Image: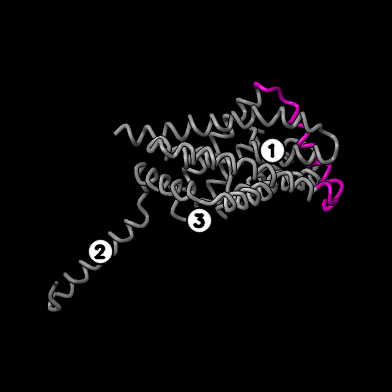
Amino acid sequence: MPSVANPRKYAGIQVRMAEQEESAVVRRPTAHEIFDAVVENAREEVHRSASTLMFSGVAGGITLGLTGLAVACLRSILGPGSWQELVAYMMYPTGFIAVIIARQQLFTENTLYPVILVLDEHHYLVRTLRLWGLVFVSNIIGAWFFALLAIWSGALRPEIASELIKLGTEAVKQNASHLFWSGVIGGWIIALVAWIVTASRFTIGQVVMIWLLTFVVGIGRFAHCVATSSEILSAVTSGVVRPLAYLQWLWPATLGNIVGGVVIVSMLNYGQVRAD
């Protein structure tokens, strides 16, 4: 311990210790540290009870309806046009921010967390498939509940409901090939969001990164099996879109989301860590 008779030396040691502590707080985590955090998160998720996953998944599906609702509200105010569309889609990330920060279950996030765990410990495969099934079904139920609340209940003003239905009608018109590859990009971006959020130490940083990346999903009209479902199911509830058309949209979009999340994010990030 430094002598009190040497106050300058003692003060210098305190300054260096404070700098080291500050550096430890603000230092960017390494890929290995992010990987370990993802694995730990996944281990907690796969051991959650079925009822907990279902409740959280339904909540996530309802909350993600805010993406289409926010866009529809602005489109009803601003009207048609290029800059109006740009401004409207700036609010698209609202639902993703709410779901991810609130730690509600989202199917496309789970193409990262449990998959990384399975690549490391293969015996978690069955638990991962269970997690996928429960969360996917509950997310779609939540999206359907949002559609009932928005359209069937008459809660929305006619011009907003009309724009929300229009979003769903536009989304369902694409062919299966386009939907699959659009879903690949959508799944890649959302799984990347999950990886980056795990790396971020501060909530404000998480919000900014979620907003930036999911804005690209919205403005690019990339298929997302849950967020876009809330828009299409709103159109189904109104009678404009047939339920069969929704199911024909759902399978290629979901498959694309899985491929984008698993292959482009999970497997490549696993490789960059385990290749060492």
User: Mark 2: which amino acid?
Assistant: Met
Q: Residue, x 43% and y 45% (percent of image)? A: 38
In this orientation, which residue lies closer to the viewer: 99 or 61? Answer: 61
Mark 3 surroundings: few (<14), some (14-19) or many (≥20) residues within 10 A: few
Indicate left or right for 16 with 54 as reference: left
Mark 2 surroundings: few (<14), some (14-19) or many (≥20) residues within 10 A: few
Task: Provide the major secondary structure of the magenta segment.
Answer: helix
**Residue 152 part of the magenta-drawn span:** yes
Label 2 sits on a secondary structure element that is helix
Image quarter of residue 6: bottom left
Tell me which numbered mark, 2 or 3, is placed earlier along the sequence: 2
Residue 263 is labelled as none
Indicate left or right for 26 with 69 as reference: left
Residue 153 coordinates in the image, percent (x, y): 84, 51
**Residue 173 part of the magenta-drawn span:** yes
- Residue annotated with mark 3: 203
C-alpha separation, residue under disc 3 versus residue under disc 1: 26 Å
Tell me which numbered mark, 2 or 1, is placed earlier along the sequence: 2
Q: Residue, x 50% and y 56% (percent of image)? A: 203
Residue 17 is labelled as 2
Residue 228 seen in the figure: yes
Residue 228 is labelled as 1
Residue 186 coordinates in the image, percent (x, y): 59, 34
